[in-house]
Image (cartoon, rainbow, N blue to C red):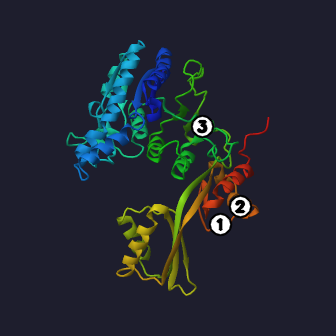
């Protein structure tokens, strides 16, 4: 008998028929003798509808009441899932985040989970009940409903799985796993059977939309094995566990690197478009210059990504280039020009929108030299110019012009042998 947490996203519970289909996945695990806890998102589009209502009621509103409004979407999904399971003969009960309780900080709209008391869930699951828990929400130290912000339901599911010491956390979504790259760009992209937490974290942060970064960070910290799979699979024909208790597919298992026997040098290629580049030239190279550049940007809530610095031969000035989202370009220029009038000295500022960040990722890069050089060679062969480069232990990223993004992804995917082999 295993303990399994099953999370269903908004598209998986978009209407009653999809909830029934998702419930059949739950029933399969219950019939196999497993203890099951379900975490649900709001029905597709419902959260946006609730946000619009709150803003229509008052453009400037109490954040605590805003959370009370938008959290109701998950409560509807949890109640409907419980009703459908009961109709199928599966004992189930819904729980709002505050009932578990899922304790959070009091940062309404972007709260962080601080603790989950698993006793109530243990008690109900041991009694044979399926616990259906609302994702995306919890309760503050002051007893108010809170919401977790972007990726909140995935984070809720991983946190619940860690609290109940689950054997795995199944993330049901509208795709059937994690792919080597976006299948819409590369038709020969392959579904990855196993991927390490570190690789998944890099892919999530570099443009892959399958899992949110927060949930992967938490899964890696708590050693919660994740399975990404499609809620639209036939639940009656797909086994969840093999005879040895291990995952046998479909989907992608996200796990510790030690569980992956053969590590690919490159596991995936990601693409993030709409990247803007800003260059400050002739910045006076004094102590604290980086803080003078990036401090005002941080205060303005502008997220900086790639950073390259070049110091002049005489050591008196430096050029600093960095990337930000296209949408923040004009705001960033204004912030830096204002800083230039007070605390920051530089000769000129320039920049452009319309870049794309292309990354190759793989834990095998740790033990193989020359991956970055081969990436540059592959792009050069296609006549693609590289503007910026950043590296880490398991990834290399470059900034190129956005018009060449898909060509670059296809070229690298083929170069590193990630294409599906011809039959």
Q: Which residue lies furthest to the right in this view?
A: 423
52 horizontally vs 157: left or right = left
Asked if marks 2 and 1 touch (Cβ < 8 Å), the reply is yes
Residue picked out by circle 2 = 379
Q: What element carries label 1?
A: loop
Residue picked out by circle 1 = 386
For mark 1, does the 10 Å Cα neighbourhood hold few (<14), some (14 to 19), or many (20 or more) residues?
some
Figure quadrant of residue 42: top left
Q: 344 above or below 179?
A: below
Q: Position of residue 10 (x, y in %)?
A: 44, 35
Give the Cα separation between the discs numbered 3 and 1. 35 Å
State which quarter of the image contains the C terminus: top right
The residue sitting at 73% across, 49% down in the picture is 414
Nearer-the-camera pick, 179 or 242: 179
Q: Where is residue 326 in the image (x, y as percent from the top left)?
A: 49, 62
Residue picked out by circle 3 = 259
């Amino acid at each position: 008998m295993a303990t399994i947490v099953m999370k269903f996203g908004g598209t998986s519970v978009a209407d009653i028929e999809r909830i029934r289909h998702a419930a059949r996945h739950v029933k399969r695990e219950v019939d196999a003798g497993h203890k099951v806890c379900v975490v649900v998102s709001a029905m597709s589009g419902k959260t946006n509808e609730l946000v619009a209502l709150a803003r229509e009621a008052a453009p400037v509103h109490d954040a605590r009441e805003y959370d009370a409004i938008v959290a109701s979407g998950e409560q509807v999904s949890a109640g409907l899932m419980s009703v459908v399971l009961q109709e199928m003969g599966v004992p189930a009960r819904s729980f709002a985040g505050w009932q578990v309780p899922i304790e959070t900080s009091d940062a309404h709209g972007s709260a962080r989970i601080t603790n989950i008391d698993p006793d109530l869930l243990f008690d109900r699951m041991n009694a044979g009940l399926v616990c259906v828990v609302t994702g995306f929400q919890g309760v503050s130290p002051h007893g108010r409903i809170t919401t977790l912000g972007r990726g909140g339901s995935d984070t809720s599911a991983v946190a619940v799985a860690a609290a109940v010491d689950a054997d795995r956390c199944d993330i049901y979504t509208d795709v059937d796993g994690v792919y080597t790259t976006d299948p819409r760009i590369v038709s020969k992209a392959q579904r990855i059977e196993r991927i390490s937490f570190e690789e998944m974290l890099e892919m999530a942060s570099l443009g892959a939309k399958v899992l949110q970064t927060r949930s992967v960070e938490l899964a890696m910290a708590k050693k919660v094995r994740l399975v990404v799979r499609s809620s639209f699979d036939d639940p009656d024909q797909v086994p969840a566990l093999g005879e040895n208790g291990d995952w046998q597919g479909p989907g992608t298992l996200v796990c510790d690197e030690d569980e992956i026997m053969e590590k690919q040098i490159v596991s995936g290629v990601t693409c993030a478009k709409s990247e803007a580049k800003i260059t400050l030239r002739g910045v006076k190279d004094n102590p604290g210059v980086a803080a003078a550049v990036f401090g005002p940007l941080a205060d303005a809530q502008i997220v900086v990504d790639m950073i390259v610095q070049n110091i002049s031969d005489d050591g008196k000035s430096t050029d600093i280039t960095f990337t930000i989202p296209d949408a923040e370009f004009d705001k960033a220029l204004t912030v830096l020009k204002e800083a230039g009038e007070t605390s920051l000295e530089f000769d000129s500022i320039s920049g452009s929108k319309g870049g794309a960040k292309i990354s190759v990722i793989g834990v095998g890069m740790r033990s193989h030299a020359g991956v970055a050089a081969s990436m540059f060679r592959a792009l050069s062969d296609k006549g693609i110019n590289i503007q910026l480069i950043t590296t880490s232990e398991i990834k290399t990223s470059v900034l190129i012009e956005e018009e060449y993004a898909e060509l670059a992804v296809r070229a690298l995917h083929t170069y590193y042998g990630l294409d599906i082999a011809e039959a």
